[in-house]
Image (spheres, rainbow, N blue to C red):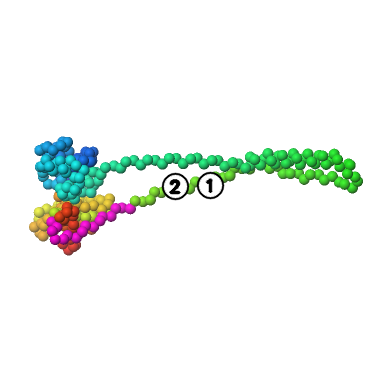
């Protein structure tokens, strides 16, 4: 029974994952002037080019109706990124889903090919005719000396010319070895910028769990605090998501996902691994601040 339940849960989760990815692919195809959280009352990905009563905001919670002025001045303008509801919605989207909304970069132009190097002139090809000419000149001088040697008088001996070694063509120079290609520099992993510390006037909005790259264990926790099931979770880099604090009847405190791929599963300290929980606040200017809970309160 337990294995069958696990298979059913895995199939349902795979279906939800495929539907979620398809949703964010469609949202990423929108024009830059349309907020990705804008939709119709009966169609999450639909929208109208203009203000209408059918528009709803899907940033967080239940779909919220929007005034004509809000749609005209914010939702259908490039400045929708400054909307408080948009900022709140971005904070609760898991990192994997938020990346789907990033637009692809334009392809970089390829550099023009470098001009071919001129081939070096082979000096050996020029040396061969010169040496042949010298041999011919030397041989002709020796013959003339032999013919005129009798008129020089007694006691003068003819000296035979020293034979000259035959010089073959000079081999072409060996080209230098081609250096191996230089590997591209490794791109360092991005680091998170810490939030400012909450001050007077900041309003608490939600809890957030943060993990580093690695493997973790998530649990399904019953109301009585018993661990019903466990699941492994692997993150390729640092990630964070919205959670809620839950205290079971036996006093066990756990931090449960409220949405996303792992919705309904919880981090349990210290069985889940090394994780942190932040208390996130909204500042008067719309930005966020946070404070990290001590390990003793996890």
Determine whether 25 is above or below 268 in the image.
Answer: above
Q: Is residue 19 magenta?
A: no
Picture residue at 46% right of the left edge, 41% below the top: 114
From this viewpoint, is residue 86 visible? Answer: yes
Q: Quadrant of residue 191?
A: bottom left
Picture residue at 13% right of the left edge, 38% below the top: 51
Secondary structure mostly taken by the magenta-highlighted segment of the chain = loop
In the image, which disc is placed on residue 176?
A: 1
Instruction: Please name whichever residue, 278 or 152, is drawn nearer the observer in this view of the structure.
Output: 152
Picture residue at 18% right of the left edge, 55% below the top: 288
Q: Quadrant of residue 162?
A: top right
Instruction: Please name whichever residue, 55 or 238, is drawn nearer the observer in this view of the structure.
Output: 55
Badge 2: few (under 14), some or many (20 or more) residues near its Cα, within 10 Å?
few
In the image, which disc is placed on residue 181?
A: 2
Determine whether 47 is above or below 263 in the image.
Answer: above
In the image, which disc is placed on residue 106?
A: none
Rendering coords of residue 142 (x, y %): 80, 41
Residue at disc 2, secondary structure: loop
Determine whether 254 is above or below 21 in the image.
Answer: below
**Bounds of the magenta segment:** 188-204
Mark 1 to mark 2 CA distance (whole Å): 15 Å
Badge 1: few (under 14), some or many (20 or more) residues near its Cα, within 10 Å?
few
Rendering coords of residue 275 (x, y %): 22, 57
From this viewpoint, is residue 266 visible? Answer: no
Horizontal arrangement in the rendering, residue 54 relative to residue 113 (left or right)? left
Horizontal arrangement in the rendering, residue 46 relative to residue 163 (left or right)? left
Instruction: Please name whichever residue, 60 or 240, is drawn nearer the observer in this view of the structure.
Output: 60
Residue at disc 1, secondary structure: loop
Picture residue at 48% right of the left edge, 40% below the top: 115
Going from the N terminus, do you reach mark 1 or mark 2 first?
Answer: 1
């Amino acid at each position: 029974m337990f294995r069958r339940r696990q298979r059913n849960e895995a199939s349902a989760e795979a279906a939800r994952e495929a539907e979620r990815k398809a949703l964010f692919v469609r949202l990423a195809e929108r024009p830059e002037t349309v907020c990705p959280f804008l939709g119709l009352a009966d169609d999450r990905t639909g929208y109208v080019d203009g203000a209408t009563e059918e528009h709803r905001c899907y940033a967080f919670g239940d779909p919220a109706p929007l005034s004509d002025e809000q749609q005209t001045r914010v939702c259908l303008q490039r400045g929708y990124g400054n909307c408080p509801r948009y900022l709140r919605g971005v904070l609760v989207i898991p990192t994997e889903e938020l990346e789907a909304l990033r637009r692809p970069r334009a392809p970089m132009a390829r550099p023009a090919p470098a001009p071919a190097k001129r081939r070096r002139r082979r000096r050996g090809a020029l040396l061969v005719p010169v040496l042949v000419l010298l041999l011919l000149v030397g041989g002709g001088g020796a013959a003339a000396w032999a013919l005129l040697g009798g008129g020089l008088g007694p006691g003068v001996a003819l000296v035979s010319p020293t034979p000259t070694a035959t010089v073959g063509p000079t081999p072409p120079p060996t080209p230098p070895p081609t250096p191996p290609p230089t590997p591209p520099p490794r791109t360092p992993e991005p680091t998170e910028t810490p939030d400012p510390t909450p001050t007077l006037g900041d309003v608490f909005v939600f809890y957030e769990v943060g993990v580093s790259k690695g493997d973790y264990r998530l649990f399904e926790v019953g109301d009585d605090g018993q661990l019903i099931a466990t699941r492994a979770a692997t993150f390729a880099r640092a990630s964070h998501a919205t959670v809620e604090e839950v205290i079971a009847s036996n006093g066990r405190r756990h931090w449960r996902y409220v949405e996303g791929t792992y919705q309904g599963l919880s981090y349990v300290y210290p069985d889940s691994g090394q994780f942190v929980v932040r208390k996130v606040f909204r500042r008067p200017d719309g930005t966020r601040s946070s404070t990290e809970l001590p390990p003793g309160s996890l």
